[in-house]
């Protein structure tokens, strides 16, 4: 068996495997004989069928398997031993036409897509911006207002607003607006306009008082959500698909009373360990908390700018575009089990992602990036903190964060995401050390405009 490689151009190659029947005949005979033992032919004891008969039954499939394994091993051994930087997988060349049962000598050809050479080295002459979001008084005011509502209490109210929770009774109406005979009657249910899908229906519950009676449509209010309807009407889900109007009578109104600005509130926002006792110190601590919360946003923006700048610095990386389109098409057809076409937009998106991945892999090797268990543990801890903060838990105890992190690591998808975060965190931290980072103060409005500019 001979293997030869021909470089067509900078990013395309052709690998040829020349195979003679003598290279695999013995293996075929051995495996056919084994098949005769494991799957004896009818009328013969295991291993006693004539070789010619076994070859007739099992020869074609066994030969195909043996040849496929031998050629595949030869291809990948050559790629590994000669350190060819290939993209995707070797694809059979259209010129390959062999009859494995008749040909004594066979030639298999494979097209290879080759990765372009990258010469980029990081240094302090490469400038990457890092945006620190300015924390304004308005941002502090908004955060405090949000927390005063979040940590507030429900009290009896005279007039409802959109945040109110109302209790009342409901009666199903017929098409004439009269009580429907044998219709649904709800003696006591909870209604919150804040969570209604339809604004017009939600508005009916704003500005009302205890004792008010009016008509509304639960189906429209909840956009036909069966689970919401079942809860509102106190019926089984199978009975909840009701489109009738209902007359509701308001019996109780609960409004949110905002938390007082006192030490109990300060601890509820900043954590029980805080020693903040006055409003001025509290506002300062909230500003610092917002600043810390903005760091992940700033870091993420740094990754976007670093990716763009470093890809540009790497130059115009040539890719085997036709090969990659063919590779993507074949892979998608294998997954979707039908003929597919790769659009130019899909191809360009793949090329963009691939160019950055090649640059990133090159730089990671240059920087000597290695991921340790400690890096993954840190990434899991940060991931858990971010998840808890989304639920308003900004100063969770370390033990709670670690327990949450351990739960995430037990989930396959979450663990994979965390490992990717760990790699990215270490990579971009190393990039920050290697390039010149230009720190800039920026308003949150201008920060958002950066993403708008990206889309344009």
Image: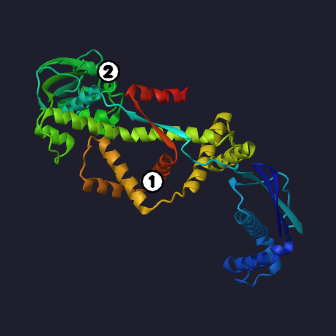
Per the model, the C-alpha gap separating discs 1 and 2 is 43 Å
Q: From the viewer's side, name the closer residue of 341 and 248.
A: 341
Q: 48 left or right of 213?
A: right
The correct choice, above or below, for 450 with respect to 179 in the image is: below
Where is residue 354? Give x, y as percent.
62, 45
Q: Quadrant of the C terminus?
A: top right
Q: Which mark is residue 297?
A: none
Label 2: element kind: helix
Please tell me whether mark 1 or mark 2 is closer to you in this view: 1
Q: Earlier in the sequence, mark 1 or mark 2?
A: 2
Where is residue 48? Give x, y as percent.
75, 85
Residue 50 appearing in the image = yes
The extreme top residue here reads 176
Report crowding for label 1: few under 14, some 14 to 19, many 20 or more residues within 10 A (C-alpha).
Answer: many
Q: 190 left or right of 62?
A: left
Q: From the viewer's side, name the closer residue of 325 and 236.
A: 325
Task: Name the residue carrying label 1.
Answer: 422
Residue at left 57%, top 38%?
A: 309
Residue 184 appearing in the image = no
Q: 313 left or right of 293?
A: right
Q: From the viewer's side, name the closer residue of 362 and 392.
A: 362
Q: From the viewer's side, name the closer residue of 246 and 318.
A: 318
Q: Quadrant of the N terminus?
A: bottom right
Q: 225 left or right of 10?
A: left
Report crowding for label 2: few under 14, some 14 to 19, many 20 or more residues within 10 A (C-alpha).
Answer: some
Task: Name the residue carrying label 2.
Answer: 199
Residue at left 46%, top 55%?
A: 419
The correct choice, above or below, for 205 with respect to 88 in the image is: above
């Amino acid at each position: 068996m001979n293997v030869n490689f021909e470089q067509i151009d900078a990013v395309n190659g052709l690998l040829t495997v020349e195979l003679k029947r003598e290279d695999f005949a013995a293996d075929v005979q051995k495996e056919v004989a084994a098949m005769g033992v494991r799957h004896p032919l009818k009328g013969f004891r295991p291993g006693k069928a004539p070789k010619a008969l076994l070859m007739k039954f099992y020869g074609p499939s066994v030969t195909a398997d043996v040849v496929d394994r031998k050629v595949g091993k030869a291809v990948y051994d050559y790629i590994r031993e000669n350190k060819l930087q290939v993209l995707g997988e070797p694809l059979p060349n259209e010129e390959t036409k062999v009859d494995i049962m008749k040909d004594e000598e066979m030639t298999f050809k494979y097209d290879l897509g080759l990765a372009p050479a990258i010469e980029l080295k990081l240094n302090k002459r490469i400038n990457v911006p890092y945006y620190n979001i300015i924390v304004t008084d308005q941002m502090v005011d908004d955060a405090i207002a949000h927390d005063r509502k979040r940590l507030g209490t429900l009290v009896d109210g005279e007039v409802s607003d959109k945040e109110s929770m109302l209790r009342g009774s409901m009666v199903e109406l017929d098409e004439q607006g009269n009580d429907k005979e044998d219709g649904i009657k709800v003696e006591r249910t909870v209604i919150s306009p804040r969570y209604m899908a339809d604004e017009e229906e939600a508005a009916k519950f704003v500005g009302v008082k205890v004792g008010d009676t009016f008509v509304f449509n639960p189906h429209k209010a909840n956009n036909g959500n069966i689970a919401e309807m079942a809860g509102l009407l106190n019926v089984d889900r199978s009975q909840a698909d009701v489109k009738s109007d209902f007359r509701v009578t308001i019996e109780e109104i609960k409004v949110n009373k905002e938390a007082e600005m006192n030490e109990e509130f300060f601890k509820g926002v900043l954590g029980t360990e805080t020693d903040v006792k006055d409003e001025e110190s509290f506002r300062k601590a909230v500003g610092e908390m917002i600043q810390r919360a903005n760091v992940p946003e700033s870091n993420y923006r740094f990754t976007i700018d670093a990716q763009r700048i470093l890809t540009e610095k790497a130059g115009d990386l040539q890719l085997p575009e036709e090969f990659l389109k063919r590779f993507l098409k074949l892979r998608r057809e294998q997954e979707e089990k039908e003929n597919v076409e790769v659009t130019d937009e899909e191809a360009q998106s793949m090329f963009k992602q691939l160019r950055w991945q090649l640059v990133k892999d090159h730089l990671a090797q240059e920087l000597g990036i290695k991921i340790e268990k400690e890096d993954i543990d840190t990434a899991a801890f940060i991931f858990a903190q971010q998840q808890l903060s989304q639920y308003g838990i900004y100063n969770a105890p370390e033990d709670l964060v670690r327990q949450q992190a351990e739960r995430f690591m037990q989930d396959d998808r979450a663990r994979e995401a965390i490992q990717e975060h760990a790699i990215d965190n270490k990579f971009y931290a190393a990039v920050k050390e290697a390039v010149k980072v230009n720190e800039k103060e920026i308003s949150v409005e201008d920060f958002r405009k950066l993403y708008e500019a990206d889309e344009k």
